[in-house]
Image (cartoon, rainbow, N blue to C red):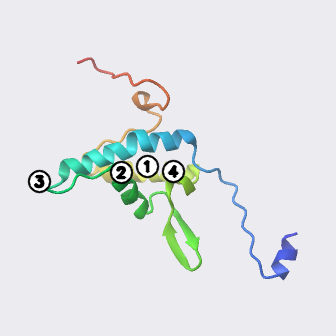
Amino acid sequence: MAKFFEAKGCHITFDSEKQRSTEQNAYIHAVLYPLITDFFNDMRKEGTRRLTIDDSKDWVQSRGYWGYKQIGKDTIPKRSSEATTTEMVNGIDKLQKHFGKWGLDIPSPNEEDFRIGEEFKPTETL
């Protein structure tokens, strides 16, 4: 079948990688983006606009943390909804390293206190 399409000048691409999981999506919206937003807001100059979660999402996407896609001759950053599970894992890892240099500890999705779908239980009592 592929030879039929090649003869017509078509290119076929099969992508067997799974799109990002609902758990990954929940983690980036419940943990990752809020932490980045708070971090940027803590560093902002007095009198400047406070950033929103959407600002953080745009910042992460615009830097290609979720990978890139080809649109015609242009290569553009993917949105999180377009990323594969592997791209999400790699992006989260890169963000943890990037912000870790600045003192922000971004927990991994598998860390006990940040498991998605479970109630948050602090490890220390106040």
Mark 2 near mark 1, Cβ–Cβ under 8 Å?
Answer: yes
Give the amino acid type for the residue marked by disc 1 in the picture: Asp
Label drawn at residue 93: 1
Give the amino acid type for the residue marked by disc 3 in the picture: Glu
Mark 4 near mark 2, Cβ–Cβ under 8 Å?
Answer: no
Q: Where is residue 69 in the image (x, y as percent from the top left)?
A: 56, 67
Q: Distance between the residues labelled 4 and 1?
A: 8 Å
Q: Which residue is drawn at the image coordinates 50% and 70% (left, top)?
A: 76
Label drawn at residue 109: none
Give the amino acid type for the residue marked by disc 4 in the picture: Met
N-terminal of the two: label 4 or label 2?
Answer: 4
From the viewer's perspective, tell me whether residue 107 is left or right of residue 72.
left
- Element assignment for label 1: helix
Residue 106 quadrant: top left
User: Closer to the observer: label 4 or label 1?
Assistant: 4
The mark total stands at: 4
Q: Distance between the residues labelled 3 and 1?
A: 31 Å
- Element assignment for label 2: helix
Q: Position of residue 16 (x, y in %)?
A: 70, 55
Label drawn at residue 88: 4
Label drawn at residue 97: 2
Badge 3, how many Cα within 10 Å: few under 14, some, many 20+?
few
Q: Which residue is drawn at the image coordinates 36% and 51% (left, top)?
A: 97
N-terminal of the two: label 3 or label 4?
Answer: 3
Work out whether residue 85 or residue 22 is closer to the camera in this orientation and state it: 22
N-terminal of the two: label 3 or label 2?
Answer: 3
